[in-house]
Image: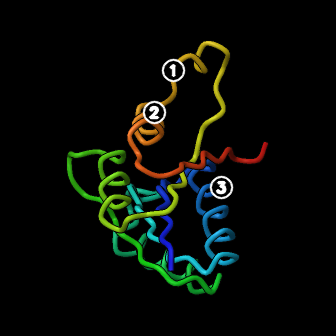
Amino acid sequence: MSTIVVGHVSTPEGTAALDWALTHASSTASHLVVVASDSPHPDVSPEDVVSQLEARLTDAGVQGEVIHFVGSSGAADSILDHAERTDAALVVIGQRRRSPVGKIVLGSTSQRVLLEADCPVVAVKAPR
């Protein structure tokens, strides 16, 4: 069984990445590792975030796990670390739409994951 690692943050882009990863994991019978990097609201605990994301996996019929990254290492480090640890076949990240000037430089997390991952990376945009 192959593994897919998806970086999740509570934004439209993070939701689009998770949706894409769930669909792909379901169709390929892959194990999904969700690396969640924040809470959607200051009053929502990391445990609640994990529970909500685990429910999404269960509802989609996808086997996997949710990891709430904590620490100063940053989202890119956490995504890359989990991709390496699980020998991931694929990493999925959300990508913000950028202005022409913003397109010159990707976000630092996206850029690091795209450049440093040892496996293919899919960057998903949120629907307009």
- Measured in 3D between alpha carbons, the distance from the residue under mark 2 to the one under mark 3, in whole angstroms, is 18 Å
Which of marks 3 and 2 precedes in the sequence?
Answer: 3
Q: Are marks 1 and 2 in contact (CB under 8 Å)?
A: yes
Q: Are marks 3 and 1 in contact (CB under 8 Å)?
A: no
Residue at position x 29%, y 45% from top?
74
Q: Are marks 2 and 3 in contact (CB under 8 Å)?
A: no
Question: Disc 3 marks which residue?
Answer: 16
- Tally the numbered discs: 3
Residue at position x 50%, y 55% from top?
91
Q: Position of residue 99 (x, y in %)?
A: 66, 20
In this rendering, would 108 be left or right of 17? left
Residue at position x 65%, y 75% from top?
28
- Measured in 3D between alpha carbons, the distance from the residue under mark 3 to the one under mark 1, in whole angstroms, is 21 Å
| Amino acid type of the residue that numbered disc 2 sits on in the rendered structure | Gln
SS class, disc 1: loop
In the displayed structure, 58 sits above or below 112; it is: below
Q: Position of residue 15 (x, y in %)?
A: 61, 58
Residue at position x 69%, y 47% from top?
126
| Amino acid type of the residue that numbered disc 3 sits on in the rendered structure | Ala
Q: Residue furthest right?
A: 128
- Measured in 3D between alpha carbons, the distance from the residue under mark 1 to the one under mark 2, in whole angstroms, is 8 Å
Labels 3, 1: front one: 1
In the displayed structure, 5 sits above or below 109; it is: below
Question: Disc 1 marks which residue?
Answer: 105
Q: Quadrant of the C terminus?
A: top right
Which of marks 1 and 3 precedes in the sequence?
Answer: 3
Question: Disc 2 marks which residue?
Answer: 111
Labels 2, 3: front one: 2
